[in-house]
């Protein structure tokens, strides 16, 4: 169990970074699509 917990701790930073990236990028994607639509 300790090995599994260590693996979970080591991967939690990656999951946290991925979650923060998704939270930041998800609202920006429609804005980028809107800018592409306006510029085109």
Image (cartoon, rainbow, N blue to C red):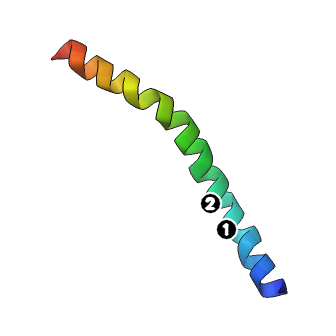
**Does residue 11 sit above or below 40 in this rendering?**
below
- Residue 20 falls left or right of residue 22: right
- Residue 34 falls left or right of residue 27: left
Residue visible at 55% across and 43% down in the picture = 21
Residue 11 position, x and y percent, is: 67, 68
Residue visible at 70% across and 62% down in the picture = 12
Residue visible at 57% across and 38% down in the picture = 23
The image quadrant of residue 31 is top left
For the C terminus, give its image quadrant: top left
- Residue 23 falls left or right of residue 38: right
Q: Secondary structure at mark 2?
A: helix
Residue visible at 38% across and 26% down in the picture = 30
Q: Secondary structure at mark 1?
A: helix
Residue 8 position, x and y percent, is: 73, 72
Residue 32 position, x and y percent, is: 34, 25
**Does residue 22 sit above or below 30 in this rendering?**
below
The image quadrant of residue 6 is bottom right
For the N terminus, give its image quadrant: bottom right
Q: Label 1 near label 2: C-beta < 8 Å?
A: yes
| Residue labelled with disc 1 | 11
Q: Residue furthest left?
A: 40
> How dense is the environment of label 2, judged by Cα within 10 Å: few (below 14), some, or many (20 and up)?
few
**Does residue 20 sit above or below 24 in this rendering?**
below
> How dense is the environment of label 1, judged by Cα within 10 Å: few (below 14), some, or many (20 and up)?
few
Q: Nearer the viewer, residue 14 or 34?
A: 34
Residue 39 position, x and y percent, is: 20, 15
| Residue labelled with disc 2 | 14
Q: Residue furthest right?
A: 2
Q: Residue furthest top?
A: 38
């Amino acid at each position: 169990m300790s090995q599994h917990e260590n693996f979970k701790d080591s991967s939690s930073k990656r999951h946290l970074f991925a979650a923060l990236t998704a939270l930041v990028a998800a609202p920006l994607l429609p804005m980028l699509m809107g800018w592409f639509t306006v510029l085109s």
